[in-house]
Image (tube, rainbow, N blue to C red):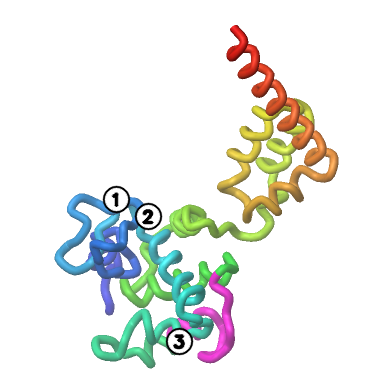
């Protein structure tokens, strides 16, 4: 494919992976109508990138595909694609061999694969890096290093200072989009922060229980 990628069908559908629409697949962010007759239509490009990443992860998790050769063969079957050329282009972009194992739960690897597929499907890269990053964040993939960012440290500090369940909830809500799960949250809080969080939650639980008991005896 050649030309302006913003004129491509995938870009117009905000579906940069050209994911085919199946009524059983209830993707987050589907447009109304959800299909152009064959391919999904999304409300935003970020939703389309999210779906692309999650579908690729399912190839690893459900089908055991862990190489560029296997992943692209399923993504772009040879009955309607030059699969070998596609595989070669993706492998070159990633800097790996066709049969080298890759991990699609690694944010950097997934980003490279997503960008390679977008370039092949749309004939170029029409998205700013921030758009790709947001789509991957929506899929639960965050680049390493963010667990030590100012956002995380500030949120962790609020737990230690507040020592309340509300502070814990607020901090986790703030941290969730920027970390790779609970383990990263706990690392950010540190041992004293975790201890303060546990104390705060326990105190809040006891308070709620006593409040309910008082209401029952009234």
Provide the residue designation for mark 3: 70
The span picked out in magenta is 89-104
Q: Which mark is residue 47?
A: 2
Seen in the picture, residue 151 relative to 8 is either above or below; the reply is: above
Does the magenta portion include 102?
Answer: yes
Q: Is residue 158 visible?
A: no
Dot in front, 1 or 3: 3
The structure residue drawn at horizontal position 44% and vertical position 89%, both measured from the top left corner, is 88
The structure residue drawn at horizontal position 46% and vertical position 80%, both measured from the top left corner, is 63
Q: Under tag 1, what secondary structure? A: loop
Relative side of 56 to 175, left or right: left
Relative side of 100 to 138, left or right: right
Seen in the picture, residue 20 relative to 31 is either above or below; the reply is: below
Does the magenta portion include 117?
Answer: no
The structure residue drawn at horizontal position 35% and vertical position 89%, both measured from the top left corner, is 83
x and y, in percent, of residue 38 in the image: 19, 69
Relative side of 186 to 108, left or right: right
Crowdedness of circle 2 by 10 Å Cα count: few (<14), some, many (20+)? many
Q: Under tag 3, what secondary structure? A: helix
Q: Residue furthest left?
A: 37
Label 2 to label 3: alpha-carbon separation: 25 Å
> Are circles 2 and 1 on residues that touch, CB within 8 Å?
yes
Dot in front, 2 or 3: 3
User: Which circle's residue, 2 or 3, is located before the other in the chain?
Assistant: 2
Provide the residue designation for mark 1: 43
């Amino acid at each position: 494919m050649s030309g302006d990628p913003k004129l491509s069908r995938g870009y117009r559908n905000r579906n940069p992976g050209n994911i085919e629409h199946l009524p059983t697949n209830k993707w987050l962010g589907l447009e109304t109508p959800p299909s152009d007759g064959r391919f999904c239509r999304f409300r935003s490009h970020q939703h389309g990138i999210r779906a692309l990443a999650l579908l690729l992860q399912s190839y690893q998790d459900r089908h055991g595909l862990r190489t560029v050769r296997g992943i692209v063969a399923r993504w772009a079957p040879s009955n309607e694609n030059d699969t070998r050329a596609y595989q070669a282009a993706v492998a070159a972009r990633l800097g790996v061999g066709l049969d080298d194992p890759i991990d699609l739960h690694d944010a950097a690897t997934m980003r490279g694969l997503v960008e390679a597929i977008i370039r092949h499907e749309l004939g170029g890269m029409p998205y700013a890096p921030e758009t790709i990053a947001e789509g991957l964040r929506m899929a639960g993939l965050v680049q390493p290093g963010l667990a030590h960012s100012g956002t995380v440290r500030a949120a962790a500090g609020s737990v230690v200072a507040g020592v309340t369940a509300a502070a814990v909830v607020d901090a986790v809500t703030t941290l969730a989009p920027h970390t790779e799960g609970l383990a990263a949250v706990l690392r950010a809080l540190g041992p004293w922060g975790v201890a303060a969080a546990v104390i705060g939650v326990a105190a809040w639980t006891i308070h709620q229980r006593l409040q309910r008991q008082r209401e029952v005896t009234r």
